[in-house]
Amino acid sequence: MPKPIIIDCDPGHDDAIALLLAFAKPELVKVLAVTVSAGNQTLEKTVLNALKVLSFAGIECEVAAGYDRPLMRELEIAPEVHGESGLDGPILPEPTFQASSKHGVQTIIDHVRASSEKVTLVPTGPLTNVAAALIGAPDIKENIDRIVLMGGAAREGNWTPAAEFNILVDPEAASVVFQSGVPITMVGLDVTHEAQVMASDVQLLLDSGKKVGVMVGELLEFFGEFHKTMGFAGMPLHDPLAMATVLDPTIVETKLLPVRIETQGQYTTGRTVVDFYGVTGEKPNVDVALRVDRERFVKMILEAMLSYE
């Protein structure tokens, strides 16, 4: 039986590829809904991007807009990575369907409550919507199997020296989620920076002659320009690795460790503080991904993108 999942995202190039990866594997996952937050760009743009990508691939699914800002902070976006639209590169037509009139947080709550099987949440952006759902409806924790999120890092940051972008945008929301008691797998920069597709992989997509494959190749061409300035040999696919971990948990190696979120540090706000040596005496609460099988991951991505007509 396919695993029921809800994807909470902020598309974003890598979010877009994560969405396509999920819908390419209906035998493994059943996407109940896609909820959207602000993050990589403003909410208006991230919702439009989700609708455009799904429409382009011939997918229609419930898409619901969530919060347009963090719980307690001003929104920080990443146009230098994702462009003015949040999905610069390919030219995508207008979507063929509209977003739901229901708020994204209520969408999460309703689907989790209604599901006959425990639901896996897959957040690939700031954790605002997921935190709000857990605060507003704590009963849903009992029907959440696991939260597999892209965010954080045990050893490094990317938006500040200490913090990864998704956690930094809304650290208070991240703290709520990490302290919720729900099982969590953190797919952070320790593994996503290793999960790179190379120029030859992109060229394979561009030369495929397949509509979706070419579009994804164009997304990666744009995405790669920013990462060249950061010294990467290829393009790290952060969000798709979280989705790949849902599809095949063996694609990463994890260790159950205590993790807390820094919300008040002068230089360290947004840090996922991972206690490797048990010095805090706190109970381990997060399966932290520390190694990835890059070759198997890249093969999964390419096969999925090329499975679309």
Image: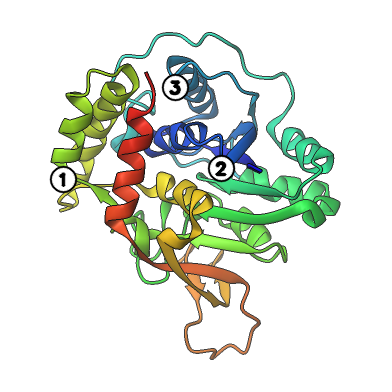
Element class at badge 3: helix
Q: Distance between the residues labelled 2 and 1?
A: 34 Å
Residue corresponding to mark 2: 28
In this view, the residue in front, 96 or 222, is 96
Quadrant of the rendered image containing residue 171: bottom right
Q: Residue at x 25, y 29 (%)?
A: 217
Q: Where is residue 87 in the image (x, y as percent from the top left)?
A: 36, 26
The residue shown at (62%, 89%) is: 281
SS for callout 1: helix
Residue type for callout 3: Val
Q: Where is residue 6 in the image (x, y as percent from the top left)?
A: 64, 40
User: Which dot, 3 or 2, sits closer to the camera?
Assistant: 2
Which amino acid type is shown beneath numbered disc 1?
Answer: Lys
Question: Can residue 71 be seen?
Answer: no
Report the Cα–Cα distance between label 3 and label 1: 25 Å
The residue type indicated by label 2 comes to: Leu
**For the residue labelled by badge 2, is the local secondary structure a helix, a strand or a loop?**
loop
Query: Against 61, is 7 above or below?
Result: below
- Per the rendering, the mark at residue 228 is 1
- Label disc, if present, on residue 53 of the rendered structure: 3
**Residue farthest to the right?**
139
Q: In which quarter of the image is the C terminus?
A: top left
